[in-house]
């Protein structure tokens, strides 16, 4: 079982901001407690959707790192990952205090891919 925990998501909306104001990081939980073999998790096709229940805007993003493990058979491991800067930036500052949905595809040991997601409220710093 794999999942994202403890999302920390905010946008730097100060007058002088970087090209990409959106900052995000998570803990990836790799639960291989029932596994018989070590498991390596790869994340791909990552996207962010601002205001998914309203005027949704979706953008592709990348994570670093995007490969985790191997997690030993019978073990549960926690790994940190973060969003990399997106060239051209993202329009995060117009979505302050609204939901943000992150979706991705998980692949474990080259098995068929599985969807994963987490949602949080976008905090902004002014």
Image (spheres, grey):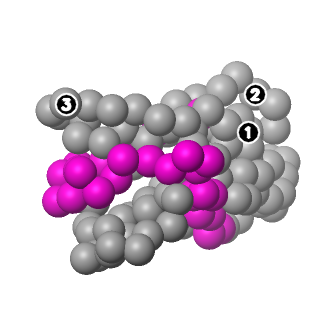
Q: Decide: marks 2, 3 in contact (CB < 8 A)?
A: no
- Other residues around mark 1 within 10 Å, as few (<14) / some (14–19) / many (≥20): many
Q: Residue 122 lies in magenta, yes or no?
A: no
Residue for point 52% across, 31% down? 115
Question: Looking at this view, is 49 or 86 the one in front?
Answer: 86
- Residue 5 vertical position relative to residue 39 in the rendered view, above or below: below
Q: Residue 88 lies in magenta, yes or no?
A: yes
The reply, left or right, for residue 80 in relation to residue 15 is: right
Mark 2 vs mark 1, CA separation in Å: 6 Å
Mark 3 or 1 closer to N-term? 3
Estimate the x, y position of residue 83 in percent, counting from the top left: 57, 58
Mark 2 or 3 closer to N-term? 3
Mark 3 vs mark 1, CA separation in Å: 33 Å
Estimate the x, y position of residue 123 in percent, counting from the top left: 26, 67
Judging from the image, what secondary structure is the residue with disc 2 in? Answer: loop
Q: Decide: marks 2, 1 in contact (CB < 8 A)?
A: yes
* Span colored in magenta: 79-105
Judging from the image, what secondary structure is the residue with disc 3 in? Answer: loop
């Amino acid at each position: 079982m794999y999942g994202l925990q403890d999302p920390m998501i905010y946008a730097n909306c100060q007058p002088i901001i970087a090209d990409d104001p959106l900052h995000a990081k998570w803990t990836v939980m790799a639960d291989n407690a029932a596994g018989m073999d070590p498991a390596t998790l790869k994340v791909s096709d990552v996207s962010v959707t601002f205001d998914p229940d309203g005027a949704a805007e979706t953008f592709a993003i990348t994570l670093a790192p995007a490969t985790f493990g191997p997690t030993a058979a019978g073990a549960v491991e926690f790994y940190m990952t973060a969003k990399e800067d997106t060239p051209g930036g993202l329009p995060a500052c117009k979505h302050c205090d609204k939901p943000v949905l992150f979706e991705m595809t998980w692949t474990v040991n080259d098995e068929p891919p599985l969807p994963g997601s987490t949602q949080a409220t976008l905090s902004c710093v002014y």
